[in-house]
Structure formats: C-alpha cells, structure tokens
Amino acid sequence: MAAHVTSSIPVARRVGGFTYAIRNIVTEARKVEAAGRTVRYLNIGDPIPFGFATPPHLIAAVEAAMRDGYNGYTASVGILPAREAVAADCAARGIAISPDRIVLTSGTSEGIELALNALADEGDEVLVPLPTYPLYTAVLAKIRARAVYYRTDPAHGWLPDLDHMRSLITGATRAIVVIDPNNPTGAVYPVEIRHGLLDLAERHGVPILADEVYADLAYAGPVAPLNSLRPDAPVISFCSLSKAYLAPGWRAGWLAVGPTGRLDEVLAAIKKLADGRLCSGGPMQYAIAAALTGDRSHQASFREALRRRAELTATRLNAVDGMTCVPPSGAFYAMPKVALPPGRTDEDYVLGLLRSTGVLCVYGSGFGLPPDQGFLRVVFLASPSELSEIYDAVAAFTREYLSRS
C-alpha cells in the first residue's frame, strides 16, 4: 500500500507579492468583534450598508432579464444593447466611439486586469499614482510586471507631479494609470493637469488607463472623460454601476478602448482574453442600458450627501491635534495624516485605533505610501451623526496615542 504524503501543498510564488490591505485588515476587525467590541467599518467604499439604495429601475431591469430567461452566457464582450448604451453615453460626454470598442466586465476590477494583461509582460513597467488603489499593484505583482510610483502631492491637493512622471517613463513603460476622481484621496484633477497627462501619453506613445468610476461623483458635477479632451489620444477608460449607480455587488462594469487606431491591437488582445473567461454576469448587463438611458436624479442627491460628509470629515479631522486632512473634492474617501512619533508606523496607529475604539480604517502603506508618514484612508459614507461620533473617538484616541511618545 502506497504511503500518504502529509506535507503541505505548495502555492505559486507570485501569491507572495499579492496584497490587498482594504480587505486584509478585516481579519483584525473580526478578532476585535470576537472580543465583544462593535466595529465601525470605514475601510471599504460600499454605499449600500450605509443606507444608500440601488435605483429601483435598475433592479427592475435585472428582474425582468431573469424572468425573461436571460440567464445563460452572453457574448464575451457583453450584450449589444448595453454596449450601445455605453457608446451613446460616451458620445454625450464628448467621445465618438463604436460599441465594438466596448467590453462589459465584472466590475471595473476585471477591466483593469484584462487591460494590464493585454499590455504588460513580465518585467515591464506601469506608472501608478502614489498613493494608489491597491488592485493595480496586486495585478501587476500577479503578472510579474513592475509598478513604478509617480508622486501626487498632498500640499497641492493630491495632484500628480507631471515632472516626476516624465522622469519615470522609460522604454519599459507600458501604461500610465490615472484615477480621477481619485481613490484613495478624493482629489479631482483640473483641466490643465488632465491635458498634461495626455501630453505625456502622446509624447511617449504610452497609453493611459483612465479609472473613471467616480466621474459622476465629483461634488461640483460630473467630470468629463479624459479621452473627450483629445479623442485621438491612446486612452482606455473604465467605469461601472458600482459607485455612482449604487450597485457594487452586481459587478457590472465596462471598459472603453479609445477610437484611435493605435489601440486596435490592444482591443483585439483584450477581447481575446475576455473570451477565456466567457462573460460577465448576464442579467446584470441589462441594468447598464437602464442606468445610462434612464433616470439619474439620485446622483444629484448622492453628490450633495457626499459633499456634506466630506466637509464634516475635513473640518473635524483637521481640528484634531497632530492630524491634517486635505479636503476631498469627489468620491467618498479622505486621506488624513497623523504626525507619528519616531519608530511608529501607520499600521501601528490604525490597529491601535481599531482595538481601542472599534473604528476601522486602512493604513496608508496599504496604498503604497511609506509607513512612517502616518497616512490612513477614511471612507465617510456613514451618516453625519455617526461620523461625528466616530471623529470624537478618533480625536480622543489620537490625543492619547501621541501623548505616549
């Protein structure tokens, strides 16, 4: 009889480079809950647990699709009515684009992964903002490409440093990631910065991956797509129903490959990769046309609710001794900074805050920032009254934490 092998089954080496702090820190929160403390989750940008509701006409569109039998596979690029709706929405925002250049994806996350896999080989470089949304670095680690960080400056509203970006572009650069409006900082880029980013892409022949999930959630009103400023520029944009349409769990997203012929081979590669995963969720695709052609009145009230919370967040956190916070201009994130004592890290502070108060944020080093700089990301979707209670707890903890230095 053969002997049984009892050693652990090894995992792929690339998994060691894959980190996603936004989710990973929940493990610590579960321990705090197990000890009997209530945890207030300010780590994930999901509006639904905070009382914001998916518009009824989107739900009706998905229900109708299911009842009408649209529960099988779709074309790998997605159903035509949804792609036509995306193309029409792009046209209304200043980009003439064919539905054939739209691919429906399982949220923006899958679109990002498809594009990076189509563009970057092992050892290639992709410019990503610092701080960054960690999905980009996680995917790059998985495909063994290299994330090269470009600075965004909190002293100037977290805007990209174009000169620094220019200095980082090499023959190995395969793409530039632009997240505007920005997660994790809440920044919205002015038009001169946006033109500067397009100049970089044109001058060096490097495509921009434009993450525009929060484009409708800038407090001053929707932000025009980056490609609308220069339709011939090499831009691949990403969007979804997750945030501005309040349906994150549906994973209904899309990517749009800009109309320039320079991106035709990239489009073909993305479609080839999309074939391999069959399709995104079928019934949820039917909500895309309903969202883009139907009533969007919820967005104005949602933006106003976010603006009020952003003002409260910046005011209250800037009033905490030892803490500063750049006021956000869009989305539902802020990135305050704590003046850490020598030898302490952002993770020390965040874990201490969690264990002492039950308030869960994400440490800035989870977004690529140096751990000794003391940044953390706050999601401010809770009600203003609950946020006030949370910021009272943050202020008291920070006062005690810094007094121990």
Image: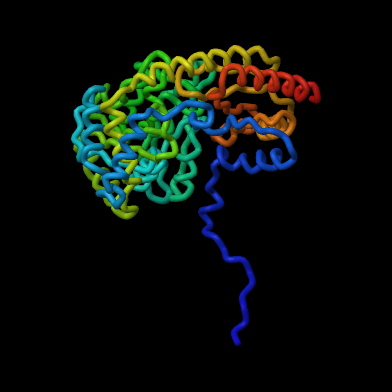
Horizontal relation, residue 172 to residue 359: left or right: left
| Residue 314, image quadrant | top right
The residue lying at 64 percent from left, 27 percent from top is: 374
Name the residue nearer the viewer: 112 or 384. 384
Reply above or below: 197 against 317.
below
Q: Position of residue 154 (x, y in %)?
A: 53, 20
Name the residue nearer the viewer: 275 or 127. 275
- Locate the N terminus by quadrant: bottom right
Q: Position of residue 405 (x, y in %)?
A: 79, 25
Q: Is residue 262 visible?
A: no
Q: Is residue 52 visible?
A: yes
Reply above or below: 19 against 128.
below
Q: Position of residue 151 (x, y in %)?
A: 49, 27
Horizontal relation, residue 28 to residue 10: left or right: right
Coloured how?
Answer: rainbow
The residue lying at 63 percent from left, 33 percent from top is: 371
The residue lying at 27 percent from left, 22 percent from top is: 229
Q: Position of residue 281 (x, y in %)?
A: 35, 46
| Residue 276, image quadrant | bottom left
The residue lying at 62 percent from left, 22 percent from top is: 337
What residue occupies the far front of the structure in this picture? 67
Reply above or below: 342 against 313.
below
What residue occupies the far right of the structure in this picture? 404
- How many circles with numbers are drawn on the protein? 0
Name the residue nearer the viewer: 245 or 228. 245
